[in-house]
């Protein structure tokens, strides 16, 4: 797996519940795996999503996805799911994500995520402390 220095990686195992009758991961579950990896990425930066909601009123919603399925994952496989921020704006970000089995690329996606107010669901700025960390994470500095 070739990854940039700022790429986050999360490891997970494929369970029976993740597969279809043929023992292959059900295609929609890759979106769940991507979500888990993004959640753990935020946590690694010091921002649990529930704490972020309670402290700032901000939540993240997925506004667009594009996923390409390349090879099947199967029961008991161990996957590494990566998160690579491609763009971080004031109220949204775009991340590239890949599900790997060892060196083998299984699925890849581009996910656009918006920041909204938890009460009104109207767009809002990403909380400043998180923007600063993301800028540093992406090597942009502030």
Image (cartoon, rainbow, N blue to C red):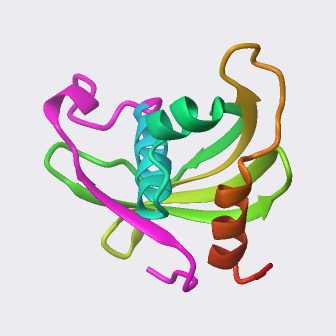
Residue 48 image point, x, y percent: 44, 45
Is 106 left or right of 138, judged from the image as shown? left
Judge whether 133 appears above or below 57 on screen: below
Residue at the limit of the structure toward the front, as seen here: 55
Closer to the camera in the image, 77 or 58:
58
Instruction: Tell me if residue 10 is in the magenta stretch.
Output: yes
Quadrant holding the N terminus: bottom left
Rendered image quadrant of residue 87: bottom right
Q: Which sits in the foreground, 125 or 86?
A: 125
Q: Relative to 55, does residue 69 appear above or below in the rendering?
A: below
Residue 11, position in %: x, y? 29, 60
Instruction: Where is residue 4? Give x, y as percent.
Output: 58, 83
Queried whether the magenta region covers residue 103, the answer comes back as no
Q: Main secondary structure of the magenta part?
A: loop
Residue at screen point 17% across, 43% down:
75
58 or 5: nearer the viewer:
58
Q: Residue at x 82, y 43 (%)?
A: 125
Residue 89, placed above or below residue 65: below
In this view, the residue farthest toward the top is 120
Q: Quadrant of the C terminus?
A: bottom right
Residue 56 in which image quadrant: top right
Q: Which residues are magenta?
A: 1-28
At a point 50% along the width and 50% down the height, the residue shown is 38
Q: Position of residue 36 (x, y in %)?
A: 41, 44
Q: Is residue 123 left or right of residue 14?
A: right
């Amino acid at each position: 797996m070739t990854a940039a220095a700022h790429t986050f990686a999360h490891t997970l195992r494929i369970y029976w519940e993740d597969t279809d009758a043929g023992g292959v991961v059900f295609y929609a579950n890759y979106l769940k795996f991507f979500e888990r990896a993004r959640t753990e990425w935020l946590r690694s930066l010091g921002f649990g999503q529930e704490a972020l909601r309670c402290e700032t009123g901000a939540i993240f919603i997925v506004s667009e996805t594009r996923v390409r399925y390349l090879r099947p994952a199967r029961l008991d496989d161990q996957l590494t799911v990566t998160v690579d921020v491609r763009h971080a704006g004031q109220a949204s970000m775009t991340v590239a994500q890949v599900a790997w089995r060892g060196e083998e690329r299984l699925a890849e996606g581009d996910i656009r995520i918006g920041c909204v107010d938890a009460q009104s669901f109207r767009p809002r700025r990403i909380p400043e402390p998180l923007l600063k960390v993301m800028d540093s994470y992406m090597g942009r500095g502030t």
